[in-house]
């Protein structure tokens, strides 16, 4: 069964902390892994990863993919209260198809 | 402004009354998709379309229909809604013929009584 598992389910940190969110997957014909941020509205795109070992970086956020061990991590350094959100991991997979499967997300709460 | 729009944003209906949720994008995207989001279950793909007249089932297609007659529109049809279809629905689109960087619509909150 194709699946994406995120951990932890939720996390509470203080401003300035560094956090690491995890995403593991088991799918047939992996194409890409995507990270999204969801506040009280629609998800917004953060990163797309297709190759192992190449870090994607945007400001205080970074992500890397390990296709051998089938996981990805999302790092957030110097967290701010505006980083509070649900972080979603999704995997695009399939041979002739392009299905997308999401994890259930990690709820991050950053306290002042 | 580049965007994905959905209508209606909120809908309360009764069991069995056919409804359509519209989705439109103005970015000339090829890939469009519908998701439902439920507490504890996350986002689940209902249907997707890689191009005009090309649609395929996602993980939870039962009880839903879609069509892709034009590139910009991808309506979601519930022929006979049931209470278990009460959910938050998102439409999304992306440029490539795949699910790469997707842009999500604002969501439609559907309640079926």
Image (tube, coloured by chain):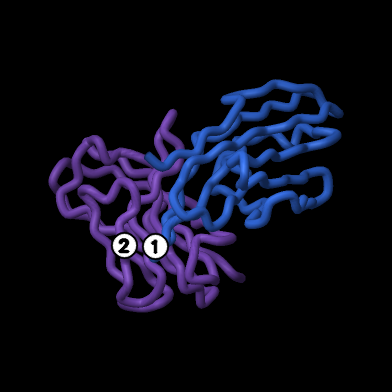
Chain colours: A blue, B purple
Q: How many marks?
A: 2
Position of residue B7 relative to residue A61, above or below, is below
Residue on which the image places disc 2: B56
Foreground residue, B88 or A72? A72
Percent from the top left, x then y, of residue B3? Answer: 55, 66
Question: Label 2 near label 1: C-beta < 8 Å?
Answer: yes
Q: Is mark 2 on a helix, strand or loop?
A: strand
Percent from the top left, x then y, of residue B58? Answer: 34, 53
Foreground residue, B7 or A69? A69
Q: Quadrant of residue B73?
A: bottom left
Position of residue A78 relative to residue A34, above or below, is above
Foreground residue, A35 or B113? A35
Side of A91 where B74 appears, left or right: left
Q: Is disc 2 on the same chain as disc 1?
A: no
Considering every residue shown, the one lying at the far front of the view is A68
Residue at (55% x, 35% y) in the render: A105
Quadrant where the N terminus of chain A is found in the figure: top left
Position of residue B99 relative to residue B50, above or below, is above
Disc 2: host chain: B
Side of A111 where B73 appears, left or right: left
Percent from the top left, x then y, of residue A33? Answer: 58, 51
Quadrant where the C terminus of chain A is found in the figure: top right
Residue at (57% x, 25% y) in the render: A9
Query: Residue A97 got which mark?
Result: 1
Disc 1: host chain: A
Q: What element carries label 1?
A: loop
Q: Quadrant of residue B101?
A: bottom right
Percent from the top left, x then y, of residue B6? Answer: 42, 59
Q: Residues within 10 Å of mark 2 (few under 14, many from 20)?
A: some
Position of residue A12 relative to residue B23, above or below, is above
């Amino acid at each position: 069964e194709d699946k994406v598992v995120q951990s932890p389910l939720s996390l509470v940190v203080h401003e300035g902390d560094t956090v690491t969110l995890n995403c593991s997957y088991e799918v047939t014909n992996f194409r890409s892994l995507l990270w999204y941020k969801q506040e009280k509205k629609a998800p917004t795109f953060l990163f797309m990863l297709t190759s192992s070992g190449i870090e994607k970086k945007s400001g205080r956020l970074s992500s890397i993919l390990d296709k051998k061990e089938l996981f990805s991590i999302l790092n957030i350094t110097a967290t701010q209260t505006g980083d509070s959100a649900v972080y979603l991991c999704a995997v695009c997979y399939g041979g002739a198809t392009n299905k997308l499967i999401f994890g259930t997300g990690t709820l991050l709460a950053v306290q002042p | 402004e580049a965007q994905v729009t959905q209508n209606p944003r909120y809908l309360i209906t009764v069991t069995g009354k056919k409804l359509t949720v519209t989705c439109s994008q103005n970015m000339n995207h090829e890939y469009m998709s519908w998701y439902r989001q439920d507490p504890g279950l996350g986002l689940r793909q209902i249907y997707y379309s890689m191009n005009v007249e090309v649609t395929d089932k996602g993980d939870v297609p039962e009880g839903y229909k879609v069509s892709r007659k034009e590139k910009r529109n991808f309506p979601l049809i519930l022929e006979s809604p049931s209470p278990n279809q009460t959910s938050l629905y998102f439409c999304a689109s992306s440029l490539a013929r795949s699910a790469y960087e997707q842009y999500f619509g604002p969501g439609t909150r559907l309640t079926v009584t």
